[in-house]
Amino acid sequence: MSDDQIKEILKNSKTIAMIGVSSEKKGEDPKNLKRKPANVVMKYMQGFGYKVIPVNPFAAGEKINGEVVVECLEKISEKIDIVDVFRPSEETPVFAEEAVKIGAKTLWLQYGIQNEVAKKISEAANIKYIENKCIKQEYQKLFQNSNPVFPVLKD
């Protein structure tokens, strides 16, 4: 997918369902949570006006970055533009099927995640498919003319 196509997707999207956002584990230092990649990306995208709904079956009902965590995509009542996945590649076909069911426009697999079956499911349903790219880094590159390798971590 070209930079122009990705820019168009980001420009025309408002709501992101983010699968794999972490909740705080008992006894864990809350600062660790702020450093987890999905949580960093969620907060960043929220900062640019996106509504990001965290999806994590083990944290349903909790709040992460001000949003209530939902168990699965089908439990989200609003229209989802992008399903952004922070889970292992082998789990992605299930998320592709769920994205089709809820009528998402784009399935986005984060950096290091790719799956041929998920790609075929998405394309067969006419859902845009992006793999092995970080949504935060793409946003920075396309809208802010910066391309950092790692996000600046703040406490």
Image (cartoon, rainbow, N blue to C red):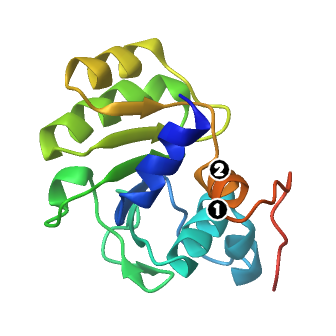
Q: Which quarter of the image is occupied by the C terminus?
A: bottom right
Q: Position of residue 110 (x, y in %)?
A: 58, 41
- Which is nearer the eye, 28 or 145? 145
Q: Residue at x 70, y 60 (%)?
A: 140
Q: Nearer the viewer, mark 1 or mark 2?
A: 1
Q: Is residue 137 above or below residue 121?
A: below
Q: Which residue was labeled with disc 2?
A: 138
Q: Residues within 10 Å of mark 1 (few under 14, many from 20)?
A: few
Q: Position of residue 99 (x, y in %)?
A: 25, 40
Residue at the front extreme of this rendering: 4
Q: Secondary structure at mark 1?
A: helix
- Position of 16 with respect to 64 (left or right) is left
Image quarter of residue 128? top left
Q: Residue at x 26, y 57 (%)?
A: 80
Q: Which residue was labeled with disc 1?
A: 143
Q: Position of residue 39 (x, y in %)?
A: 60, 67
Q: Secondary structure at mark 2?
A: helix
